[in-house]
Image (tube, grey):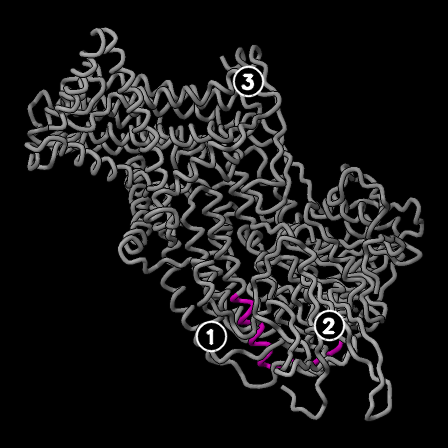
Amino acid sequence: MSYFSDIINGTKSLLTGMRITGKYFFVNFLTRRDVITEQYPDNLETLKMFDRYRGEVTMYHNENNEHRCDACTLCEKACPNGSIEIVSDKKLNPETQRNVRYIVKHIYHLEMCTMCGLCIEACPQDAIQWGQNFHHVQYDRGKLTKVLNKPGSTIMSKTKEKK
Amino acid sequence: MILNVFTDIHNLLLGLMSAKVAHITELVLIGVAYLGIFAVLGLFLVWLERRVAGFFQLRLGPNRVGPSGLFQTIADALKLVTKELTGTVKADKQLYKIAPYFVITTALMTMALIPFSHEIQAFDINIGIFFLISVSSIGVLGIFLAGWSSNNKYSLIGGMRTGIQMISYELSVGMAVVTMVVLAGTLQISEIVELQKGGWFIFTGHIPAIIAFMIFMIAGTAESNRVPFDLVEAESELGAGFHTEYSGMRFAYYFLAEFVNMFIIASIAVVLFFGGWLSPFGITDAIPFAGLFWFSVKVIAVIFIFMWFRWTFPRLRIDQLLTLEWKYLLPINMVNIVLMALLVWLGLTF
Amino acid sequence: MMTNTELKNKIENLVNGLNFSGEESDFLCVEVPKEILRELMTTLRDDTELSFDYLFALTGVDFGNELGVVYHLESVKSRKLIQITVKTEDRENPSIDSIHDIFPAAFFNETEAHEFFGIIFNNHPDLKHLFLPENWDKGFPMRKDYTDINMLVR
Amino acid sequence: MEEYLTSKLKTQEYFLNMGPQHPATHGVLRLLLKLDGEIVQNIEMDLGYIHRSIEKMCERDTYKQIIHLTDRLDYLSSHMNNEAVCLLVENALNIEITDRIKVIRTMMSELSRIASHVLWWGVMGMDTGALTSFMYGFREREMINDIFEETCGARLTMNYNVIGGVRYDLQENFVKRVKDFIVHFKKKLPEYDKLLSNNIIFQKRLEGIGYISKEDAIAYGLNGPTARGSGVSCDVRKIHPYSAYDRVDFEEILFTEGDSYARYRVRIREMWESLSILEQLVDKIPDGEHRVKTKAVIKLPVGDYLQRVESARGDFGVYVKSDGQKFPYRLKFRSPGFANLTALNKMTKGLKIADLVAILSTIDVVVPDIDR
């Protein structure tokens, strides 16, 4: 007798499954309510990432094109994959009459970065921070190597308030 | 009115050439027309499948090219046409090239029997259903040859599975059809439809007809190699099964033929159970070509059920496939035929 | 549950020639000469009171002068953990007895230790390259003296 | 008749190369199958297609830098992997962490577990041919990933744990989002059962397939839900409680059938248990520091350290041999997937290719976890 009860129970289980998918079909067919996918390139304008989103490392520049990086190389040392290289030089500070290190290039290899955040934690000046940009697509890997300090930028004087 | 168009063309051709040549020309024209139907139908059904799948899966499906993504499949087809035809080095070249045409030809041949409406049916032979069943079983050769000739083990397994599956499920399709033929008393398709003017067979045949319909749907799914019986392709096991090594247009042939086969199975179901082109209660019987509308609606409804199966069920294993056929469907089918014969004999049908 | 000291005494009575340490830490560490490794493993597994029947991890270690394997065994019954170390001084042709027939779980782990440290496990039937390419001939990557130009040096 | 046939017909076993690119191998696992028709006679494994030698990389990294590498092992339970390394260092240095940290870590672990199991469920459906379950699983996973993204800044490689706590404090939205998720998921989990678990085809595909006995499960070192399907009690959350698991009330799911369907049901029931853990904790997140101060340079004393956590795949262990430097002398990740995979041959022998796919799915392999 289990032969027939097998058939009946089996059919019942199949119909239950069809009811679940059918429900979603008709809801989506009529109202699009349960559609969960993002319409990706279309929603670029409205797509906003969360504040903590780790997209890339950026350097904060204020409106006078000034940054806070004093070339201490702590971020370079903290990086596990060597994705940060700092090219620095020394110049004479006219006020204090002492040689001060300043950064020529803060090179950031996005292609090697694993977004671990150790550089940002290591930075004593809060000079580098997370950027929310996730759209890193490039046709050439070389374009992923970025220089974080903008051309012509200078270091902020210490008296200015920290961000 | 439109019927006149056919006569007009006929007369025009007769005026231009001798009767024999005109006849052949007409046949060619019909063949070309059916090729067109084949392609459009295939592309439309692919689009429908993807769109329906999208809604089942909380997605939208194709929605960029054309209204509601309707031209997406045409774009895909264009891409496939331009693609290189690759193959394995040690493939059996002749069989490898010939295999897709088996599938295409049989699909086209069976399509000739489909009564789109009262007026549109290319080939109304008096052994229609029998012809349909026998021709459609040639198609399996195409799949089998593809699996065999590709010189790929995945293809081979897929091809072997086809053989097993088709031989088994052909029986059930045939038996379910025979059940309905017992009720109809004829094999000619147009006659079967005409007989249903008094009521569709699924109602007049009641219990055995419903059982036959369910069996036909299950076996039909298996015949058209769709989930839950898509062991031939079984993308999680065999990659792409028998057409792993096919690319470009040859792949497109298989792809389209799969969908056209689904259409054919659905059409047979509509003809046998739901009165073909007949409108419900004969409301539009007077309007010519209204049958085309009703036929399409019914076929799409049946196809939707196939799609519903596909996007709900897991796949069976090969031994379970055979168990289902030989231990469940076949015995039930046999009892069902006897039941139907009894009903017809005792006059218990409506 | 047994304390580490009790465990130590218990094992000492069963097998001779072992070197114990780490009685205060979470798990008892045993250093075993490679000749009696199999004897110790069999005893630990089969003794009803100990029943260390679950090989948790098998780690190949390069000790500098020696190569060795660290086994972590656990008893499913008592959830007691024990660490067993076995060393071999021969760096050219290091060999340790395989325990894959005592603990089937060791089978692939021994293969791994073989290809990364070059330790040959006696009586292991299939010491093939599991992770590395089949034609790998650049030495044993996890050894301390292995160098690779692509390796980031700190 | 059969004797006559076997004497006349020449049959041959053949090899089928499954992977590294194959839909069912969940990544780049390569299996060399020895087949007799469709029946699997033997499986030879070839791993290492995604081997990055993370253990060797760890030997040149400080303990802080190791953490982000563990994300890349079993990427579906990256939080638990992080936690293992952090717990190891904290226990070794006796760093006292606050209750808040413990609770946050526990909640995140359970969310990760649900996210991993939900994905597994979807893929399980896909491997058996039911394609729709994948998207349904992703719907729930998306909600969890949003929680992660808002709290940790990343969806997959979370890297949320640091030594001595967690990187950021919880978002104010966190509690609300988790509560929303609990409500949502409680409605959707029964649907999972209706769609797949009770489906007759699905049951027949899994029942009695891939059997492994309790003794074999222990001997092969199986762990996690795979072993619990065979009745081996091996939940690290119960046997060696860490973080806040000693203060929540949950059940260790055990099934004794040992077949694929038992393993399937273990994971489904585990989602319910994770949900109940979340429910117990979500209203009772204690106040306090989210991160305690640690030394800038972390050096572990000479010795051997082992820390185990229950990741979504099972018993994840970190073994560190320290020589007192700031780099570990030898670090070993004991991966649960690798141990589970060793029993694949035993489970699959004599079954069909379709069964192999289903079994591979029920032991829930994540290839980076196996290759490390």
- As helix, strand or loop, the secondary structure at mark 2 comes to helix
**Numbered label attached to residue C96:** none
**C130 with respect to B74 (left or right):** right
Between residue A30 and residue B225, name the one nearer to us: A30
Front label number (1 vs 3): 3
Residue pointed to by mark 2: D89
Which residue is painted at 18% across and 32% down in the image? B292
Residue pointed to by mark 3: B93
Which residue is painted at 49% across and 67% down in the image? D146
Front label number (2 vs 3): 3
Counting from the top left corner in percent of width and height, residue D69 is at: 69, 62
**B54 with respect to D274 (left or right):** left
Question: What's the chain of the residue with tag 1?
Answer: D
Whether B97 is drawn above or below C44: the answer is: above
- As helix, strand or loop, the secondary structure at mark 1 comes to helix
Residue contact at pointers 1 and 3, CB within 8 angstroms: no
Which residue is painted at 22% across and 20% down in the image? B122
Name the amino acid type tagged 2. Val
Asked if the stretch drawn in magenta spans residue D104, the answer is yes
Residue pointed to by mark 1: D280
The stretch of residues the image draws in magenta is D93-111
Q: Same chain, marks 1 and 2?
A: yes
Name the amino acid type tagged 1. Gln
Front label number (1 vs 2): 2
